Amino acid sequence: MSTFKAPRGTYDLIPPASAAYLAVREAIAAPLKRSGYGYIETPGFENVELFARGVGESTDIVTKEMYTLTTKGGDELALRPEGTASVLRAALEANLHKAGSLPVKLWYSGSYYRYERPQKGRYRHFSQVGAEAIGAEDPALDAELIILAHDAYRSLGLRNFRILLNSLGDATCRPVYRAALQDFLRGLDLDEDTRARVEINPLRVLDDKREAVREQLTGAPLLRDYLCEECKAYHAEVRELITARGVTFEDDAKLVRGLDYYTRTTFEFVHDGLGSQSAVGGGGRYDGLSEMIGGPALPSVGWALGVDRTVLALEAEGIELNLPDAVSVFAVPLGEEARKVLFGVVGELRTAGVATDFAYGGKGLKAAMKAANRSGARYAIVAGERDLAEDVVQLKDMESGEQAPVPLAEVVEAIRSRLA
């Protein structure tokens, strides 16, 4: 046994469980690909200042959870704790906002890193699929993204998830609410760190999960009561467009999300079968983030959905995905000549799109057939010297056990027709 193990709070994806993760990623990406979103991939680490400015210097992500390092050249870098800031940075650097009509629609998939207390559903290394629509202020765009996430979850068979929806206002109305909330929070019995947060970003206190804090938030002023007319109209249209598509949601006046850059529309997908870590994804509008990181004004909206937690949600609902067989055919050669011939047949089958494996290592018939069984293949091709002398192979149905000779020249087509 190796003396090394995966770092605490991380995990390895290995077959066969890894197939479910791939299927989830593909299911989330599918509606995005059908809706004009192009794939983007950014580095696993970025300049620390990108996240400090974008995510927010007062957030737990930046102050407590970011993995940071200093390079030999003295650069301060951080493993990416989330995707939006990186994607927007890449879009600005490549001048995608100048290349054509807006919005720029992008989707991504990758690993992210936060130094958190490990528990089920919360890891220090986790996987997300995300989508960003950059450069347009349009309620239809907010609604589109919420609907696409909803459709992705439905396509996986999930039913017991809820969509929470709120508006965080804008630069016009939020400062008035911020002052009212600070006045309320200053009168509560809070610890020193939380009191400091009240002065820096009081909305984050509403997102506090500690029961001792939550009990005191009863009666806190709600942002919906302070929205300007423009924000009210914007939010009403988002709600109307989502409803028209038959997507149900719940208004949650205390939903603020954990990042500083959100404005107006904010939403979260939660699954009640996951216990305390119930959020499976979320996002919102971030109209000022581009300016925060040195770019022009580019109102934008996006989300990220957790692959890990989506898999847990599937397990909670007892959903087994209809995954394709890893291997459809397994070739078993008996003798050196058969090994060379069947190796060629395996290549032809793969070229024809048939998932095929081979009994490597010179196994005997018994061991090779055990390997064929373990592979999950529907058919096995068996050939020895006598078969080759007659220009045939033995095609065995691994479910029924029936076996019959098939001409060597026709074996690829015979297998394709059976699998079809």
Image: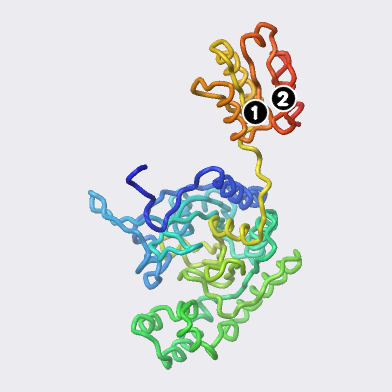
Q: In this view, does 392 lie to the left or right of 124?
A: right
Q: In which quarter of the image is the N terminus?
A: top left
From the image, tell me which residue sits under label 2: 415
Amino acid at dot 1: Val
Amino acid at dot 2: Ile
Residue 363 locus on image (x, y percent) = 52, 22
The residue lying toward the viewer, choosing from 127 and 53, is 127
Residue 92 locus on image (x, y percent) = 46, 54
The residue lying toward the viewer, choosing from 20 and 179, is 20
Residue 267 locus on image (x, y percent) = 59, 69
The residue lying toward the viewer, choosing from 234 and 84, is 84
Q: In this view, does 238 lie to the left or right of 62?
A: right
Numbered tag placed on residue 329 in the rendering: 1
Q: Can residue 284 be seen in this view?
A: no
Quadrant assignment, res 376: top right
Secondary element type, mark 1: strand
Label 2 vs label 1: CA separation? 8 Å
Secondary element type, mark 2: helix
